[in-house]
Amino acid sequence: MENLSFSQSARVEIQGDRVLRFVALDKQKAEYKTIGFDNPTITIKDYRPIGLATMAQLLETGNLQEFAPRFNTPAYVEISVQDTDILVELHETDETTPLHTLWIAIGIEEYIPVYDYVFEHIAPLVGHLT
């Protein structure tokens, strides 16, 4: 069962070069898992042409330092929950300065460096109003 939690344009910012674990690349999307989140897992599917080109360039050149600056481009973001997985889909947007920011961070515990983070699940208020 899929529950859409967020659907807006947003700035996309990854915490650093090693936040995402690459899963797959095809003509339509690049797919990643966010490192350090196991329950729930966080899957990112990037459908943006810049996202596809950025991953293809990384696979070709191996230059990780260019990945984050190119990946950090505004997107139309859809966040949904599917059982024990949070799905983040990034689509192309015309907005250059969105009001929202999607910050993608790693989740590490008991290792150095330890990053503090707050995980908050945003759920729609359907049927809760009287």
Image (cartoon, rainbow, N blue to C red):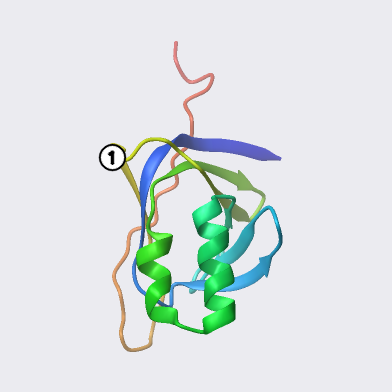
Neighbor class of circle 1 (other Cα within 10 Å; few <14, some 14-19, many 20+) is: few
Q: At 61% across and 37% down in the image, what residue appears?
A: 3
Horizontal arrangement in the rendering, residue 9 relative to residue 99 (left or right)? right
Decide if residue 102 is in sight here. yes
Q: Quadrant of the C terminus?
A: top left
Q: Residue furthest top?
A: 130
Q: Where's residue 34, x and y in %? A: 51, 67
Q: Which residue appears at 54% of the width and 50% of the height?
A: 48
Q: At x 57% / y 36%, what residue is drawn?
A: 4
> For residue 14, which quarter of the picture?
bottom left
Residue 41 can be seen in this image: no
For residue 45, side relative to residue 116 (left or right)? right
Tag 1, which secondary structure?
loop
Q: Is residue 104 above or below residue 108?
A: above
Number of numbered callouts drawn: 1
Position of residue 95 relative to residue 21, above or below, is above
Amino acid type of the residue that numbered disc 1 sits on in the rendered structure: Thr
Rendered location of residue 12, percent (x, y): 38, 53
Residue 23 appears left or right of 71: right
Residue 43 x %, y %: 58, 59
In the rendered view of the protein, which quadrant contains the N terminus? top right
Residue extending farthest to the bottom is 112
Question: Horizontally, is 116 left or right of 42 in the view?
Answer: left
Image point 62% across, 61% down: which residue? 30
Q: Position of residue 52 (x, y in %)?
A: 57, 60
Q: Residue tagged by mark 1?
A: 97
Q: Is residue 69 above or below residue 18?
A: above
- 72 or 15: nearer the eye? 72
